Amino acid sequence: MTEAATGADGAAVADDGRPEPATPRRRDAARSRELLLRAAAELFADRGFDRTTIREIGERAGVDPALIARYFGGKTQLYLATTRLELGDSAPADLLDEERLRTLVERVTRRGPGPSFQAAVLPGDNTEVQQAARTYLHERLVEPLYQRFAAEQVDRPRLRAEIATAAFAGIILARSGGAFAELAEAGPEELLPLLHDLLAASRQPPDDLTT
Amino acid sequence: MTEAATGADGAAVADDGRPEPATPRRRDAARSRELLLRAAAELFADRGFDRTTIREIGERAGVDPALIARYFGGKTQLYLATTRLELGDSAPADLLDEERLRTLVERVTRRGPGPSFQAAVLPGDNTEVQQAARTYLHERLVEPLYQRFAAEQVDRPRLRAEIATAAFAGIILARSGGAFAELAEAGPEELLPLLHDLLAASRQPPDDLTT
DNA sequence: CGGGCATGTCATCATGTGATGACATCGTCC
DNA sequence: GGACGATGTCATCACATGATGACATGCCCG
């Protein structure tokens, strides 16, 4: 997963004609920054903020952890940068849109859940970190759902949107968390219909067969 | 919530005829143990294992933290004791049973989510701690649901049970986590029908109105 | 080619935390 | 009443972790 080191932001990559200066760019701040950012994104995603140490990040990135302070200001700011990175595509469709759901699930399958999901669920000590992640979560998931529900005149639209988002976050996190065997193994194809049904129920009560 | 200090384990309580020695039991190991256990249960429940320090526990309990080592062996064992305590009532009905759901939600509303819920969702470093919490979660929530689904001949019963449990955990945690305003304020009465509908959908797909 | 800044490396500090053991004090039992 | 164990208090250790600064070295510019 960490195979390609080339650009994505392209800041330091010599994307001009020359294939590369013979010197393999030993000292390249942009590259170091990028490597740190990626390593951090991965680690934060599947271990959370607290349980990730800057030494681990540095080790995975192959960069001295001290540079985190230099380039980002500290672990916290690195996390925030990670969160912004997580935005990925910027199509704020809601979770009931099948396309959107598929995209999200597939991305999460590949890259692990973003920090935001953990922020949804973890007890927050209202640090700047949590705040950022939560804001992101609202903008990207809750709000679109709320818009839909409101438009559909559903009762308690915001509450329903929050519940659906929380449920989704729980499932996504549980999937990569390792507590549930079958869920962890289930691929997007198996998951998607079940997820969709579950989320759809937050708007439309099922037939309510007996209990 | 910490009103009654009497027994529960009854180790040191003078359960013979005499009502109580006039001396208010200044030095009472059983009482200290109990206080620690309760304080720990509360803190673990709403801050998680890592973010709870033994000094906090001691402070809340009004007991010196060093006694944790003496009475439980360490923070980890204290956590495990807490998990066992969490078992509470021992009626393993599944989440689709309205009675059961109500009981659970109300208890969680009062006492906060148990450590198990966090274990469901947090990335696990397979410590003894996580294992215990997960085992509990399976026995209490997943398995009953699985039994029901299997009996009902639902497709992929185990996967569905895990998904429903994960969704439930997500909602419960998010509710007390503080990331969602309306969800946090919603009382059991508002929550229950929505929760029930959502969970029921894990077994019975809704009518699937368009997308 | 030489100065100066950017980049990287390393040692070290400050803090928080779990654990431990020495010591004090209470309570019970003979 | 006194001895001995149980109980509680305190200081302190060991370790992990984030942060910081001193230093070395590469790189670009003139």
Image: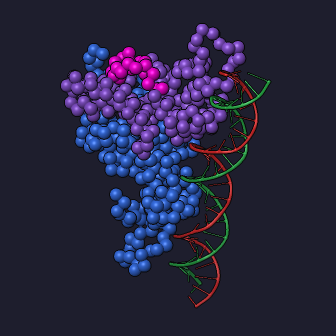
Chain colours: A blue, B purple, C red, D green
Which residue is rendered at x = 55% and y = 28% of the image? Answer: B37
| Left or right: where A21 falls relative to B44 | left
State whether residue A149 appears in this view: no
State whether residue B79 appears in this view: yes
Occupied quadrant, residue A13: bottom left
| Left or right: where B24 falls relative to A143 | right
Residue B31 x/y as whole percent: 61, 24
Residue A94 x/y as whole percent: 36, 37
Residue B147 x/y as whole percent: 27, 25
Which residue is rendered at x = 19% and y = 25% of the image? Answer: B153
Which residue is rendered at x = 31% and y = 41% of the image? Answer: A184
Range of magenta residues: B85-104
From the viewer's side, name the closer residue of A97 and B25.
B25
Q: Residue A81 colored magenta? A: no
From the viewer's side, name the closer residue of B96 and B74.
B74
Q: How many marks?
A: 0
Which residue is rendered at x = 24% and y = 30% of the image? Answer: B157
Q: Quadrant of the N terminus of chain A?
A: bottom left
Occupied quadrant, residue B13: top right
| Left or right: where B205 falls relative to B78 | left
From the viewer's side, name the closer residue of A32 and A154.
A32
Occupied quadrant, residue B154: top left
